[in-house]
Amino acid sequence: MNEVDEFIAAFKKEEDIYSSWGELVRQYIKNTLAEKRMDSILKIEPSCRLKDISSLIEKAFYRSKNYEN
């Protein structure tokens, strides 16, 4: 198994964790704004999504970076 295949396998294994984390952050933002009576500033319901695996692979392994790290 090469590095990309290992990355894909790890991502798929942890996909539910990332999804749950996104939902937690989304709900935290909504709750914090509601507590401060600022929830009316949200004109569109916040949502979360996981990055498409092909896009994730492209960014993780193949994109050209103009910086060293």
Image: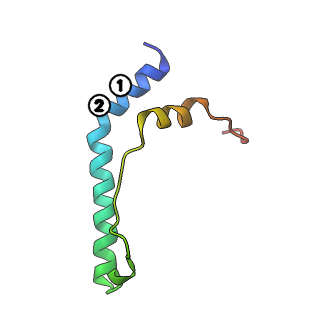
Kind of residue indicated by mark 2? Lys
Asked if marks 1 and 2 touch (Cβ < 8 Å), the reply is yes
- Percent across and percent down for residue 6 are 41, 22
Q: What residue appears at the point 48 percent right and 20 percent down from the top-left corner?
A: 3
* Amino acid marked by disc 1: Ala
Kindly state the secondary structure of the residue where label 2 is placed. helix
Residue 51 bears which disc, if any? none
The residue at which mark 2 appears reads as 13
Q: Residue furthest bottom?
A: 37
Residue 8: % across, % down: 40, 27
Which class describes the residues within 10 Å of circle 2: few (<14), some (14-19), or many (20+)? Answer: few
At 72% from the left and 42% from the top, the residue drawn is 67
Q: Give the residue displayed 26% in from the left and 41% down from the top.
A: 16
- Front residue of 17/55: it is 55
- From the image, tell me which residue sits under label 1: 9
Vertical side of 21 occupied by 45: above or below: below
Q: Quadrant of residue 5?
A: top left
Q: Tell me residue 34's x, y (percent).
A: 29, 80
Q: How many marks?
A: 2
Residue at the (31%, 52%) spot, across then down: 21
Secondary element under disc 1, as helix, strand or loop, is helix
